[in-house]
Amino acid sequence: MKILHTADWHLGQGFYERDRLQEQRAFIDFLLDFIEREKVDLLIIAGDVFDTANPARAAEQLYYDFIARLCALRHCELVVVGGNHDSAAHLEAPKRLLKSLRVHVVGSLPEDLSQAVLRFECGGRRLCVAAIPFLRDRDVRRAVEGESFDEMEARTKAGIARVYKDMAELVLADKREGEILLATGHLTAVGGRLSDSERSVHIGNLGSIGAQQLSPGFDYVALGHLHHPQVVGGDECIRYSGSPIPLSFSESLEKQMRLLTITEENQLEQQAVKVPLARRLIRMAGSLDEVLAEIAELKIGKEELCPWIEVMLSEGEVNPSINDQIREAAAKQGAEVCKVSRKGSVARLDPVDGEVVKSINEWKPEAVFAQRIENYEGDVDKKTLTQCFQHVLDEVG
């Protein structure tokens, strides 16, 4: 029995006023070809199917076209759990219809945890999936009047650990002979390597959910949220598959999926499956001469989409002449520059009128709030206000 672990597709992501649909279509074509070739029995998407709670129609169409093509293969089922970018209600709206097509959706944690337990059997091999989605504060704790934010954060973390413990107890109590137990999740774990494109997903820095709290009895934990493929706490059976395409300039170009195989000996084996990149996101830094030299050496494959480049100059000021020089050099090589800035500066040069502006695409909500609170002189502690803001951000998804 073969299981494929993916996550963080972020369909419909906007990137410096550009869409990623071409890249995402290329990934889906590769994915379906791999599933058919390798006779994969179950595909898992561990959260963040979409980039926003209200995705564009083109992103929705890409998702449902993918499901139709997957179902046409007739041998692969699908498990989808909600992420912090997804709307649980939006994902679950066609849940009954999709179930008839062997597509299982768990957008939010059900009150009856048994509804998130999914069982599969193929070739005499058995798999039980505890389909745990992104856990919002309301899923894991009750509001307590007068509690501090530190207390709130501690109870949120304890609540998440409790969900995994309860799910493990539930599936272990009804474990079938020879059954492999797998859990999903969408969260930040201890020591996880972040990029510029992840959003903090709980109050404060929820970085204290460790390997021992995620896997009480599970043979594998398929995680989403962090976009770099990685192991959690040194435990090879707790993994982030990472995103299938780079979602920011800070991300590695090495993208992968995880292929799990339940062997004839009923052992769970796993391997990395490299995902080919349709488009590279390239970060260049240095002096103007160094950047121009790097651009001149850029090689672009025949099948590759136009690479996007971020330039960070280490010296001098960014002016219209320099901006044009960099962009023209890239264009000659078949690449496109998305951003030109001076190292240490958040400003960029607008390619139209040469003015230094700050594009909204370059700001995360947390960064906007940080700028606003920098000169705040009110009575409420800045740390408390920041925690309140992060709590609101989490609630709105």
Image: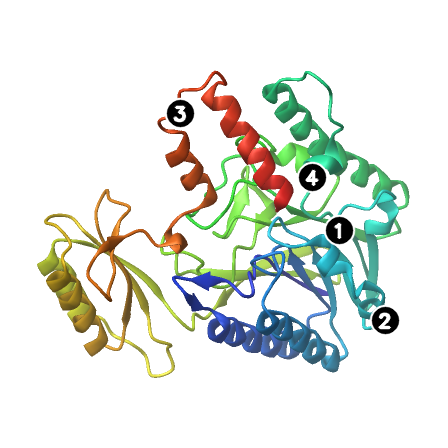
Q: Residues within 10 Å of mark 3 (few under 14, many from 20)?
A: few
Q: Nearer the viewer, mark 2 or mark 3?
A: 3
Q: Is residue 30 visible?
A: yes
Q: Residues within 10 Å of mark 4 (few under 14, many from 20)?
A: many
**Where residue 83 appears, x then y in whole percent?**
64, 51
What distance separates the C-alpha of mark 1 from that of mark 4?
13 Å
Name the residue carrying label 4: 215
Question: Which amino acid does the dot numbered 1 rest on?
Answer: Ala
Report the Cα–Cα distance between label 2 and label 4.
30 Å
Q: Which mark is residue 376?
A: 3
**Residue that numbered label 2 is attached to:** 100
| N-term-proximal mark, 3 vs 4 | 4
Task: Check disc 4 and give the amino acid type.
Answer: Ser
Which residue corresponds to mark 1? 131
**Mark 1 → mark 2, Cα distance in angstroms:** 18 Å
Which label's residue is closer to the chain start, 2 or 3? 2
Which residue corresponds to the image point at 58% horizontal and 48% vertical from the top-left? 239
Q: Earlier in the sequence, mark 1 or mark 4?
A: 1
Q: Viewer-nearest of labels 3 and 4? A: 3
Q: Earlier in the sequence, mark 3 or mark 1?
A: 1
